[in-house]
Every structure is written in structure tokens, then in C-alpha cells.
């Protein structure tokens, strides 16, 4: 009798396993979809005849279902890049599958910029309209169509795309959980389009801290908007002083006390200066004393990480990578503007998103 019962239990267990396999569908693989979206506020001061609409790619991660809300990552490519190249170089689809991210990848068009750079230096974009408004319109459309979680949005980008991410986040902070900028620039860093190249080489020619304080005051916004900045110490396209200025801008936006407590004549420990131009740029935009400071060696490179926190929460993280030029750290070097050596910036992006709840 016992043997018969044991045999029956075994048969039932096998039947249960068979039925589970029969009716349980494997998760849908990740896939790309295309779209296009514009904004009435998307006209550019620097290109007034360009229709304020841009195409985009959206990546839906493996197992994505409209029945549950998913976090959204906006990832803006740099100059001379396409969304496809940027996605491949950063390996962002693998990260998206791990974290369940919907990834929005806006596409710049040559009629708006012949080098496919985002027009971060445009006055309207720096004020939150222009291409920042187009990006936000795309975000709203993708979030609505694909069941994205509007409360868990990270805006990120590389170079000009990082500058656009910073402008969109600072000007539309209520719609963003955090911002990640690789080799980019502060919002409003250039006083005019003609000054863009000089700003890239020397740092902002405007007071980006004052801009941030004005935004905070006008928005009456006490909430925290965290920032993570990754920059190569040997970047000679967008010099590291721009990363330091971006740190200071978001510390001002978040009313962090570090700016008030830095001693007079604080030395600009942003990178190893190699010429007079870099020394001057660094001196204008020193990093204030951090709440935490760590140095580690990864392979042949030294990575310096500084953090500023507010009531235990991450406010700003600054990652400086020795030996890295103007490229996505730890990317696929088969694609332009990617450097295969560590640290992997995509992993730093994942860590940042986990820290801020994105």
C-alpha cells in the first residue's frame, strides 16, 4: 500500500511538472521598437527652421509586461553616434534585462546638428525647452505606452548627450529620480552657441551655480535630485573641469552645505593638469570637500570616487578615471567613443540607479 501511494505521488508530481511546462510561457525576449515624438516647446533658438520632433529607439527588456510598471532609463548618445551604436557600445540591453529597465534612446538628426550633437548650448534647451522639452515629450509617450514607472526615471547621457541629460533633469527635476552624466557638461555652461567649443576646452563661461540656485528658488523644490558624474582625467575634448562644475551645480541645486564650508583658495583636485589651460580651468571650478573619498586601482587605472550626502542619502557622486579620454569607460571598443578598460561605466550606472531607487 505504501509503495502504491508513493508511486501515485510520483505520478502526480510528474503530471504537475508536465502541466507547468505546457502552460507556462517563457519570458518574451528583449526587443527594440522605434518611435517619433515632438514638443511645441521644442523649437531651437540656434536652428529655428528645424521641426521640433525627433525619432527614438525604445528597448523593452526581457520579460517586460504592460501589467506591471517598469523603471525607465533615458540614454542620450554623444556627437557622431547613433542610438544603435550607443546601445551596443554601452551594452545597455544586458543591464536593462537585469534591472527590468525600459530604455529610451533619443536620436538626433543631422538637420538639427550636422555632427548629430545634442544642442546643449542652445539657449532654449538650457532653459528646459528646446531639445530638453522634446526629450521629456518622448519620455512621457514611452512611459504611457509601455507602462513605465514615472516615479523611477533615470536620465543619462554621454558627452553632448550628458549635457542634454543634465539640462533636462535640472529643469524638469520633478519628473526625474536621478541623473547620470559621462564626459558631459553642466546645464547652461555656454553663454552662446559660439562659445561651446571654448567651454568644452576650458569649463563654463557662465555661473552654473547661480543658475541652479535660481532654479531651486523658482521651483520651491526641497526634494533631492541625485547626480552621478563619470569623467576621464585625460579627456581633452570635454575637460574634467566641466565635471567639477557639474558637481558644483547639483550641490547648489540640492542646497548641500559643502559649497558653504569650503575654505578660501580650495585647491582644484579634479585631475592631473597637463597644461596651463587645464590648470586655469580647474582653478575656476574646484571640487569642494567631499563627505567620502576613495581611491582604488582597477587594472592599470586609478579610480577616484568622491561623494556628497544629504541626511544619509546620496546627493552627488563624482568618479574620476585616470588614463581615460573622451570615451565611455568599460565599453565595447569596437564602437567609437568607447574604452574597454575598467571601470565599466554601465555598472556604475546600475549601482547609481540602485542607490537612488531608479
Image (spheres, helix red, strand yellow):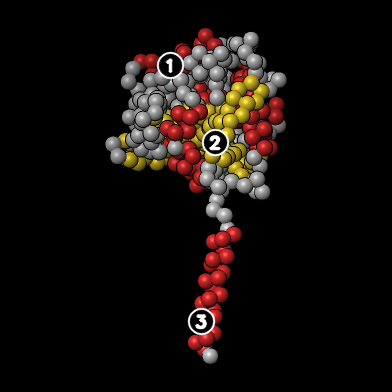
Q: How many marks?
A: 3
Q: Please, what secondary structure does the residue beneath circle 2 have?
A: strand
Q: Is residue 39 left or right of residue 251?
A: right
Q: Earlier in the sequence, mark 1 or mark 3?
A: 3
Q: Nearer the viewer, residue 169 or 39?
A: 39
Q: Earlier in the sequence, mark 2 or mark 1?
A: 2
Task: Look at the numbered discs 1 and 3 and tell me whether their residues touch, using CB distance below 8 Å.
Answer: no
**Label 2 environment density (alpha carbons within 10 Å; few <14, some 14–19, many ≥20):** few
Q: Which residue does the numbered mark 1 point to in the structure image?
A: 201
* Camera sees residue 209: no
Residue plotted at (53% across, 28% down): 76
**Label 1 environment density (alpha carbons within 10 Å; few <14, some 14–19, many ≥20):** some
Q: Which residue does the numbered mark 3 point to in the structure image?
A: 7
Residue plotted at (58% across, 31% down): 34
Q: Position of residue 317 (x, y in %)?
A: 49, 37
Q: Nearer the viewer, residue 187 or 293?
A: 187
Amino acid at each position: 500500500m505504501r509503495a502504491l501511494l508513493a508511486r501515485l505521488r510520483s505520478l502526480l508530481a510528474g503530471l504537475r511538472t508536465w502541466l507547468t511546462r505546457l502552460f507556462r510561457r517563457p519570458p518574451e525576449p528583449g526587443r527594440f521598437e522605434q518611435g517619433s515624438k515632438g514638443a511645441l516647446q521644442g523649437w531651437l533658438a540656434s536652428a529655428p527652421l528645424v521641426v521640433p520632433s525627433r525619432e527614438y529607439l525604445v528597448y523593452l527588456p526581457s520579460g517586460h509586461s504592460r501589467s506591471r510598471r517598469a523603471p525607465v532609463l533615458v540614454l542620450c548618445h554623444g556627437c557622431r553616434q547613433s542610438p544603435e551604436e550607443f546601445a551596443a557600445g554601452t551594452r545597455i540591453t544586458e543591464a536593462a534585462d537585469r534591472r527590468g529597465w525600459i530604455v529610451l534612446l533619443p536620436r538626433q538628426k543631422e538637420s538639427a546638428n550636422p555632427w548629430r550633437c545634442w544642442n546643449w548650448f542652445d539657449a532654449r534647451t538650457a532653459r528646459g525647452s528646446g531639445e530638453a522639452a522634446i526629450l521629456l515629450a518622448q519620455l512621457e509617450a514611452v512611459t504611457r505606452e509601455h507602462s513605465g514607472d514615472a516615479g523611477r526615471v533615470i536620465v543619462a547621457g554621454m558627452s553632448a548627450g550628458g549635457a542634454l541629460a543634465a539640462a533636462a533633469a535640472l529643469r524638469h527635476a520633478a519628473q526625474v529620480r536621478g541623473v547620470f552624466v559621462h564626459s558631459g557638461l553642466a546645464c547652461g555652461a555656454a553663454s552662446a552657441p559660439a562659445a561651446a567649443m571654448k567651454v568644452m576646452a576650458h569649463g563654463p563661461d557662465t555661473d552654473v551655480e547661480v543658475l541652479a540656485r535660481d532654479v531651486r528658488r523658482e521651483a520651491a523644490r526641497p526634494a533631492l535630485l541625485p547626480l552621478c558624474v563619470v569623467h576621464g582625467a585625460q579627456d581633452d575634448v570635454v575637460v574634467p573641469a566641466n565635471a567639477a562644475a557639474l558637481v558644483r551645480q547639483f550641490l547648489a541645486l540640492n542646497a548641500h552645505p559643502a559649497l558653504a564650508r569650503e575654505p578660501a583658495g580650495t585647491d582644484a583636485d579634479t585631475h592631473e593638469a597637463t597644461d596651463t589651460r587645464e590648470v586655469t580651468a580647474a582653478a575656476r571650478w574646484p571640487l569642494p570637500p567631499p563627505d567620502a573619498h576613495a581611491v582604488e586601482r582597477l587594472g592599470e587605472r586609478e579610480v577616484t570616487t568622491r561623494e556628497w550626502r544629504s541626511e544619509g542619502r546620496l546627493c552627488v557622486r563624482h568618479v574620476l578615471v585616470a588614463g581615460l579620454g573622451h570615451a565611455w569607460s568599460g565599453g565595447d571598443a569596437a564602437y567609437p567613443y568607447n574604452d574597454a578598460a575598467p571601470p565599466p561605466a554601465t555598472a556604475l550606472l546600475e549601482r547609481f540607479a540602485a542607490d537612488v531607487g531608479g
